[in-house]
Each structure stands twice: as C-alpha cells, then as structure tokens.
Amino acid sequence: MVRLILPIVLMSALTACKRPMPQLPSGPPVVHVAKPLKRDVPVVVEAIAQTEATANVEVRARVEATVDKILFVEGSEVKAGDALFLLDKKPIEQRLAAAKGNLGQLEAALGRARQDVERLTPLAKTGAVPQKDLDTALAVQKQAEAALDTGKAQVTSAELDLGYTDVNAPVAGIIGAKQVDVGSLVGKGQPTVMATISPLDPIWANLEVSEVAYLNSAGKMRDPTNSPAFALVLANGQVHPHLGKLAFVDRMVNAATGTLRIRVEFPNPEKILRPGQFCRVRVLTRTLPGALLIPQRAVQELQGLHNVFVVGDDGKASFRRVKMGKRVGSLWLVDSGIAAEDRLVIEGLQKVRDGGQVEAQDIEVEDSSLQELLANVPGAKNEAAATEPAKNNAAKP
C-alpha cells in the first residue's frame, strides 16, 4: 500500500514545483485623495423634548345631578361654548319653583310689615299707641327685608344650578375620553371631572439643555421676544413644518443634573402634535466661517486619538495627528492638524504607510450631508449666505 501511495505524493510535489509563483503587485499602491471641504458650518444645539399643551382644562360638574346625555365625540375638536353634557334638570327645576314660591310669600310678608310701620308711625307720634309697638313693627319689617334677600338668593342659586345642567366647553381644543357615563351621578360632594380639553395650537415643547449649551447661546435667549428660530424633529424623523420661538427659560439650573429647563412654543394649525410626544428640538447658536470638513472614513481613530494620511507633492504619504470636532452626517469637522490645501487619503488607507510612496488619484468630497444640515436648521442658510458676501467684500482692495 505504501508503495502505491509514495509515487502519487512525489508526482504531486513535482507538479506543484512547476506552477508559476503569484506575482506581487509592482509599483506604489493606488489611493484616492481629496482636499478638505471649506464651508461655513452651523453650530447646532439639539436636545430631547416632550410636548405639552398650553392648558389642560378639566370639564367638571358644578351641580349634583345625573348625566342625561353626552353630546360630543371623544377625541374630536370642540369650540368654546359647544354643548358637551346635559344633566337631569327636573330636581333643580322643582327646587327653583319652590324658591320662587317662597319668595312670593316673603314679599307679601314684607308688604304687610311695611303697612304696619306706616300705620303705627303717626299714632306713636301722637301717643295713641305705645312707642314699643312701633319699635316692634320696625323690627318685623327689617326681618322681612332680610328674609326677602335670602329668598332672592335662593332663587338665584337655583337658577344658576339649572344653568349648570347644560355643560358647555370652556375653551376650544381637542377633548379627551369621557370619564362619566349616561346615568352617572356627578357633583355629589365635590365637582366631578367629566372630560378634559387641551388646546393644541400653539403647543409647547419642554426640554432640558446643559449649562454649557445655555451659556454658549445665553445672549440669544436673554430676550424671549427676540429669540432664535427653533426646529422640531418628530419621532419618525420628519421635521415639523412650523418654526418655534422661545417661550420660557427657567430661573435656575438644576444642581442635580446641571441642566436648565426651556420651553419653546410651536404653531400647530394641523393639530399633528399632541401632548406627551417625544421629539428633538434644534436651534442654531452660531456659524463657524471657513471650517474644514473631511469624510469620516478618512480618519483613523485609536484610543481617543485621530490620525489621517496626507499625500505631498512628491507622492509620499505622511502620518498626521488631527483634532476632530463635531460630526456632520458622513463628514467630520476638523479643529486643527490640517490645512485647506492638504490632500488627504480618503480611500485605500489600509495600503498606506508613513513615508511610503503612493499613486494618488484625486476625487471630490460630497457635501450632501452639510446641505442636508443647512436645510434642516432654521436660519442656517441665511447666515451662510450673509457670511459669503462679507468675505468677498473683505477680499476686495
């Protein structure tokens, strides 16, 4: 068996020796290089926020009665004064009729007391009757007048209670779910909450910003009437079509979290925003003129340090330590370490060695990420446009 296998092994070895060796690539590696983008970059502060209605008005029963009818559709929009509930009127109508009857009796009693006073007054002056009788008649008249005032108040109270059986919307807004049913006894002991109405236009967005972010933009937030424009990004990534304005800045920083509470008011005519939604609020704080941006794939990151490769005029790649700033989509803002004329290795970093020769092919860096940021930050395009003419005018002699 060994004699049969040995010739096969020897033949395989000889065949392998005759195969040509793979040729190593000749010449320097090919890499793609590009100069940094030099653009005016907006500095944006973004924070998580939660929407809140400008008011949550509770519709309460102001009289003790049973619910006779419910006149609204839950979750619908109502106007101020719209009928919402109808309470049972019969017991209150009966009380009003009794109060009016009692009022008639009190008016009659007062008339009789006044007649007694008018009759006894001349007689007491002439001594025909004792002064005591006149004093008693005057006291009875005053008691009748006080009783009449009480009777009138009882009639007014019954009329008010009768009016409270028609429960109308105190404000315009979206009404929530009903909290009572037909036949429920409401208003017994305390006003019963029957429903809640929330005005939705405008709507508030409450957010917490860091102390540093507040200090960087404190000048713009000092006067709420002249505040910067705010944009609101919904949970699905869509941008709310209406810009907001600063409505409220809290008086103190939360010492536990180091944040400050801010409220932004947004128009909401379509009623898309509802209270309790989580969203992101962004605002332009300032613009960095002539900032340098490079693709993120051109940066090597190791233990918190960032490096790039720069190709010189001699075709050699050199290692460069850089300091990076904020990310702008697929681009990265460079704080220091490179110049606008440097040619950076964008693709082919795995082929490059410090001081090694490369074959550089120029490409263009797309600025679509920056354009998207400018489109989604209120006022960014206007500031960038205003900066450009200023730079052009400064360059003229």
Image (tube, rainbow, N blue to C red):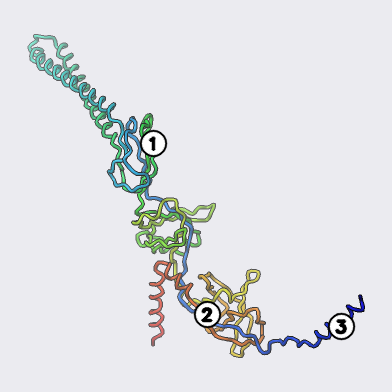
Badge 1 amino acid? Val
Badge 2 amino acid? Pro
The residue wearing badge 3 is 10
Direction from residue 40 to residue 144 in the image, left or right: left
Looking at the figure, which quarter contains the N terminus? Answer: bottom right
Direction from residue 315 to residue 192 in the image, left or right: left
| Numbered tag placed on residue 350 in the rendering | none
User: In the rendered structure, which disc, 2 or 1, sits on the residue that comes first in sequence?
Assistant: 2
The residue wearing badge 2 is 36
Query: Tag 2: Cα neighbours inside 10 Å, few (<14), some, or many (≥20)?
Result: many
User: In the rendered structure, which disc, 3 or 1, sits on the residue that comes first in sequence?
Assistant: 3
In this rendering, the label closer to the viewer, 2 or 3? 3
Above or below: residue 394 compared with residue 160: below
Above or below: residue 21 compared with residue 259: below
Q: Position of residue 40 (x, y in %)?
A: 45, 75
Local SS, label 2: loop
Query: Tag 3: Cα neighbours inside 10 Å, few (<14), some, or many (≥20)?
Result: few
The residue wearing badge 1 is 180
Residue lying at 57% horizontally and 81% vertically, measured from the top left? 344
Residue lying at 47% horizontally and 55% vertically, measured from the top left? 278
Kindly report the distance in space between the C-alpha atoms of the residues bearing marks 2 and 1.
66 Å
In this rendering, the label closer to the viewer, 2 or 1? 1
Local SS, label 3: helix
Q: Quadrant of residue 27?
A: bottom right
Badge 3 amino acid? Leu
Front residue (pair 58, 82): 82
